[in-house]
Structure formats: structure tokens, C-alpha cells
Amino acid sequence: MTVNTWEINVDLYGVDRKMNTNRDLSIAKSKRLDEFYTKMEDIEAELKYYRKHFERKKIFCNCDDPSYSNFWIYFKQNFNFINLKQLISTHYDREKPSYSLKFLEGMNISEDNPIRTNLEQNGDFRSPEAIRILEDSDIVVTNPPFSLFREYVAQLVKYNKKFIILGHINAVTYKEIFPLIKENKIWLGQSIHSGDREFIIPRKYRGILKNAKTDESGISTVRIKGVRWFTNLDISKRHEKLILYKHYNPEEYPKYDNYDAINVDKVADIPCDYDGVMGVPITFLDKYNPEQFEILGDSRYHDESDVANDINVLHGKILYRRLLIRRIQ
Ligand SMILES: C[S@@+](CC[C@H](N)C(=O)[O-])C[C@H]1O[C@@H](n2cnc3c(N)ncnc32)[C@H](O)[C@@H]1O
């Protein structure tokens, strides 16, 4: 079978069933449990890499109840230090009209109350009022609802906005997101490359999420694996070269049964001297430097009849989802 990698389509099913997906995240997504509050330590660990981007900018946190959101608190506390022009946050209410809070340059951030504006709509990021604020903003920073991630990113791209948002690594295989990754319009952030992250959740989620816990002070949390920052702002990690030490040999790096690409099981084992197409784990994106590699496609593609095919078949067995990459000579 011959497939032009430049024409490979990406998965239409979203989350890859073969990946080790996080059970609580799947439950949250299917039951639309969207109240996962980001911890300050995770926000600080990422946002410190973007200070030059924030200079004189209007920040919009569009999924952030200011009374809970650490994004709002972070920007409020650092407003003068990072020299912001404006901070605005909209509170979302499922059923009734909501409000926005705003700080402007020239205000005394530590003493003045934020400007509160009642909204006619409910603060939904898709509502015309929220879109008007979006259009007037420079950078959107938040953790949007997992269940609406595709739509959320599509809107940011449509309005040509800069952003730093939290999501799940599996989102890279979504048909709406993968082309953006491939075309270097979105990349993963600087601070999270592995492990899980803890989120504060409403107490009522405790009986629903398997790994939810409540501490002595009554705060409920859950740890989620595979969380990543997604951004389109430049960061230094994107320019760091992945140091490779292994050399290609056909025994260790067999070709797929049905496609002219070698299989690489671990990112650290990418051979430094193979010039053809390589199938690598999705976590390659944590190390991706577009000056070192190009992304050609995803291991699942759709043929002329729109039938999904997997490229990553080795000795008759379909392997975990792969990204197809090539070294830039
Ligand atoms: C994952 S939580 C994160 C909250 C906050 N950004 C943080 O990181 O702590 C997503 C938030 O988006 C809100 N939300 C749900 N649907 C929304 C919508 N259509 N428009 C705006 N916000 C929404 C939820 O109420 C929830 O508070």
C-alpha cells in the first residue's frame, strides 16, 4: 500500500481507545463535570515562561469564576509586576445572566475593587458578549471545560488569538487539533511533560470520580494524568534540540507491515541517523523542536472511501497510536 504522508487524515474518533486514558477524565467528559480548578503552583510553573509576552497586553480568562479561579488571582497579584494593560474574567452560569470583572492599567490593583459589569448573557465563551471581549483581548489564559475543548480551540483559532490553555495530551489526536499541531500553529507548553496534576473539585464529584479525595480541611481534589499546556506563544523549549544517541539498525527498528516507516517505541530511542519516516509515541510532542523534525501525519488515516486505516501495524498487531515524523536534514 502506498500512502502519501502529506495526505494522511487524522483520527475522527477523538480519544484513542488504545492509549492509557484516564478513567476519571473520561467520566468527567461524558458526564460533563467541568468544575476542575487549577492549582496556583501549576499556573505559576507555566506562566513564568511567558513574561515577555504579557508585557502591555490585555488578558482574558473566559472560563473563570473570579471567586474561585487561580488564573484570575495570579494575574491580579502580578498585574503590575508583569506590566499588564488589562485583565478581564467572565463568570459562567448555566442558567442565568452572569458578569465580568476587570482591572485596567492605572487602577490600584491591591486596593481598588475590580470593575464589575453585568452581562446580558450567561458568560458562555461562545456567547456574543464573550466573543466581543475576546476580540478586544490579546491573550486568553485558562483551563477550559474538557468537554468543550475542540470547540474552545476552534474559536481561539477563528479569532486569531494568542493563548495558553490547559488540556489533555489526547486532544492532539482530535481531527480539529492535529492539523494545528502538524502545521506548527499550536504546541505543548513548557512545564508539564509527564505524570499527573491535582485539581480542586466540588465535593459532590467525590462519589462519581474514582480517585477523588478530601483532606482534613474539607477540600476535595482529584489527580488527572496526561494534562498538558497548549499554546501558540513562543517558548524556549521549542528551540531546544533533542539529544539523540542511538543509531539506526533494521533489527531494532523494524518497518511497519503496511507502511514505509520504522517503528520507534520510546522518544529517547529515536535514531540520530535515520532519514526516512519514523512512527513515534505521541509524547514526542513534549520534545518537539520544529527546526529538528517535521510532523508528517498520524498513524491513523482515512482512505478515499473514508475508511479508517492504521499504519502502525507490526507483525500483524496494531501498536499504540504513533505520530509520523522525519528528521530535518
Ligand atoms: C476545568 S474548569 C476550570 C476553571 C478555571 N478556569 C480553573 O482553571 O480553575 C472549566 C470551567 O469552565 C466553566 N464552563 C463550562 N462551560 C462553559 C462555557 N460554555 N463557557 C464558559 N465557561 C464554561 C465551568 O463552569 C468551569 O468552571
Image: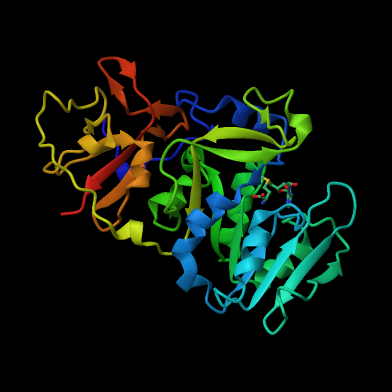
Q: Quadrant of the C terminus?
A: bottom left
Where does the image place residue 325, in percent across and percent down from the top left? 28, 43
In the picture, measured across the screen, residue 238 lies left or right of residue 146, that is: left
Vertical arrangement, residue 8 with respect to residue 132, above or below: above
| Residue 224 falls in image quadrant | top right
| Residue 199 falls in image quadrant | top right
In the picture, measured across the screen, residue 309 lies left or right of residue 119, that is: left
Where does the image place residue 65, in percent across and percent down from the top left? 76, 55
Q: Is 15 in front, or is 207?
A: 207
**Which residue is found at the position 17% from the left and 28% from the top?**
253
In the current view of this chain or complex, which residue is farthest to the bottom?
106
Q: Is 40 in front, or is 118?
A: 40
In the current view of this chain or complex, which residue is farthest to the front?
216
Vertical arrangement, residue 86 with respect to residue 328, above or below: below
Where does the image place residue 161, in percent across and percent down from the top left? 57, 66
Vertical arrangement, residue 257 with respect to residue 41, above or below: above
Q: Would residue 303 be seen by someone viewing this image from the given angle?
A: no
Q: Quadrant of the N terminus?
A: top left
In the picture, measured across the screen, residue 90 lies left or right of residue 298, that is: right
